[in-house]
Image (spheres, rainbow, N blue to C red):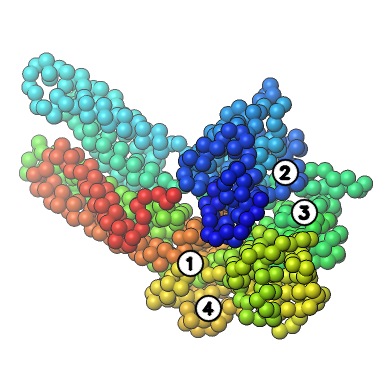
Amino acid sequence: MIKNEGFSRCFHCGEDCGSSIILFDEKQFCCSGCQTVYEILSGSNSSEYYNLTDHPGMKTAFPELGKRFDFLDNEEIKQEILDFSDNGVSRVKFFIPSIHCSSCIWLLENLHRLNEGIMHSTVHFTKKEAAFTFRDSEISLRGLVELLASVNYAPYISLESVDKSSKKKINRDVYYRLGVAGFCFGNIMLFSFPSYLAIDDTVEQFIRQNFGILNILLGIPVAFYSGSGFFISAYKGLKKRFISIDLPIAIGILALFFRSVYEILSGTGPGFMDSLAGLMFFLLIGKWYQGLTYQALSFERDYRSYFPVAVTLISGKGEESILPLKHLKTGMRILVRNNELIPADAILVKGEGSIDYSFVSGESDPVKKTEGQRIFAGGKQSGPAIELIIEKEVTQSKLTELWNQKPGHEERHNNWESLIDVISRFFTAVVLILALVTGVAWWFIDPSRAALVVTAILIVACPCALAMTLPFSFGGAMRVFGRNGFYVKRSSVVESLSRINTVVLDKTGTLTKSNDFDANLDHLLVDEASFNLLRSLVRHSTHPMSVAVYQALPNAPALPVTGFTEHLSKGVEGTVGGHHVKLGSGEFVLGRLPGGTPAGSLFVSVDGTPSGYIILKHKYREGMRDVLISMGRKYELHLLSGDNDAELPALLEFFPSADHLNFNQTPVDKLNYVRKLRGEGKKVMMIGDGLNDAGALYESDCGISIADDVYHFSPSCDAILEARQFRKLSTFLKFSKISRRLVIMSMSFSFFYNIIGLSFAISGNLTPIVSAILMPLSSVSVITLITVATYLASARTKLNITYPV
């Protein structure tokens, strides 16, 4: 039952139902998709799903699955996807991008209520992964995927996702080393209590000596397993005649360990094993903190992450079969359906192509193709199925060439890391010379104290705090960025961001929303009654352009529509109130493409009479104006777009001149433009969203990919920015500069600490045990300083310090 109402919310998704409400089971729904999901849940006694939040569902048009997942019946592909299959029971893990809240977890983990063949399911929320165990006799792999898709949790399955050889192994080494250091640190402190309490009782001294032996045994794995990375790095540096910051750290570790062994075995002191273990623990925490990123994100995927798993092969007899993509060869004939990707360069041999190349070229309008024309890989067919003859294999296609479009310049280096390496060379040389000179001087002053003074110098002068400056400063910035939807690939990117003076932006999908439009009705030649005819027609379409037209037209009671037909990539038509109404392209509505109208216009006819046209423009992202004005004050702005120049007048006010606005740009044009700017000595940040931006993103000093779904495909880049956080872009740049100043402050603090400590050690007023206490204390001080400063800076710039929901 459909009823006209005022403002009302959908029971399932919570969105406005508009003027038309679907009533079912005494509840209101905005569309048949939401109603159907509700029926599935309530029919399986799963209606408590709606108790989790007020509106836990997701709006869906309830997709027609058709033959979309036919390839999952192919035995070879099934074996590649399944994690386990034996004795009629299978297990599979999927990446499901639409997982977003607690209700999603509840529904997926209770999927067995929708089909009893599903034995068990678990969700890993942060990775957006779900694992399912099911009985093959009751539900197939294809059936499971179709069930997930029917409730709007379609898994993301690509060629890369089923290629097990490409799975990255998690580096657990740092966790093992950190665990050993932490375990030994706690136990060494426990065994050192007699020394802390300074008990001189004979029995206690016996215990203390035995505990000292245990501390040595625990100190061995700390120094030579947990600290092995520093020794290996120092050795490799020396082998290449290069002194890195790990060399003085390695010297400090050895000085602490062997001095401690000498004191414990000789009975002259308790040693410093607790300080050694504490130092190693904090150093490894710094390394872990620096490398901590979001595992689900991928910054450098290859073409396989975007390509389908299989294609539909047409044999010489016209029979259709599923073929794994890796077996696709030149000369084969394939079928490509609506919204399917063209996997390789091919020739169109049957049907009419309407190819969406927006992801490859940036051009938002579909390209018409006729029989005999070449179609490049990477486009999507928008319309009826077409048949193609493969011209090049997947690895040789144009799309693959774009993937591999890497500039020929040398890999960019992190200036701060290089600077610290230079400082460490100077620092190490000075410390060794000071230790030698001071040791000789004290040999003449008091030979009994010479060794103690030299040891104190080597221990207190360990540049551990300096080594922690970068990982904790830039690592802290990475964490703040990540909590605000800006995912940085490595800590050096934060430093690169702080040095940017030129910003280059793509237009379509970056400044504008990919599937959201503004409709200009000024050129419509219809009366108010015809407005309602058109509004009633487009209300039945879920296409983004139809939705934009519907929202722009005046509100009025919906009229009944008969014979509604949606022609993919052409338009819609139907009979409304006895009038035949058409909306779509010029060729569809008028039978020709009229001149003098803006690109992307939709034409209207009522009863065969042309009734003007509607101009559609991509909506700009929220906050775009403020972002461009803010960045324009501090940075030189440029625009590169593969689209036409229809929006040049609207954008000109944000850029210094028309020379900085470049349209109809090919991927090579974009790459060369960025290269030219860098050749002029400018520090360039490139922001794009499509594969056509991959070369320019890589060529820039810092490449940022803006994405509506960060877990889906991303071009080669240095960072991924959630589209909804675009308004914070200038704030992120400001925070990167704050982090850079924080590095300078931390380095200054570390130097000051070392200078004070060395002055006391050289004068003989600092014992090795006090030196060993001061050394980790300096590291803790730097960590505390950076942590507090990062927290205050995030609050000052109004960046969230909790994870976004």
User: From mark 2 to mark 3, how far is it between C-alphas?
Assistant: 12 Å
Residue type at mark 1?
Glu
Q: Earlier in the sequence, mark 4 or mark 2?
A: 2
Tell me the residue at 24%/48% (across/down).
784
Relative to residue 411, is residue 508 depicted above or below? below
User: Disc 3 on helix, strand or loop?
Assistant: loop
Q: Mark 2 points at which residue?
A: 69
Q: Can residue 266 be seen in this view?
A: yes
Give the left or right position of residue 681, taking residue 72 as reference: left
User: From mark 4 to mark 2, how far is it between C-alphas?
Assistant: 43 Å
x, y percent for residue 614: 66, 75
Asked whether the residues under the numbered discs 2 and 1 touch, taking CB atoms below 8 Å apart as contact, a structural biologist would say no
Give the left or right position of residue 669, taking residue 759 as reference: right
User: From mark 4 to mark 1, how far is it between C-alphas?
Assistant: 15 Å
Residue type at mark 2?
Phe
- Residue count near mark 2 (Cα–Cα under 10 Å), binned few <14, some 14–19, many ≥20: some
Q: Which of marks 2 and 3 is nearer the N terminus?
A: 2
Tell me the residue at 26%/41% (across/down).
252
Asked whether the residues under the numbered discs 4 and 2 touch, taking CB atoms below 8 Å apart as contact, a structural biologist would say no
Q: Mark 4 points at which residue?
A: 651
Give the left or right position of residue 693, taking residue 380 as reference: left
Number of the label disc, if any, that sits on residue 622: 1
Q: Earlier in the sequence, mark 2 or mark 1?
A: 2
- Give 606 or 159, whichever is nearer the viewer: 606
Residue type at mark 4?
Leu
Quadrant location of residue 500? bottom left
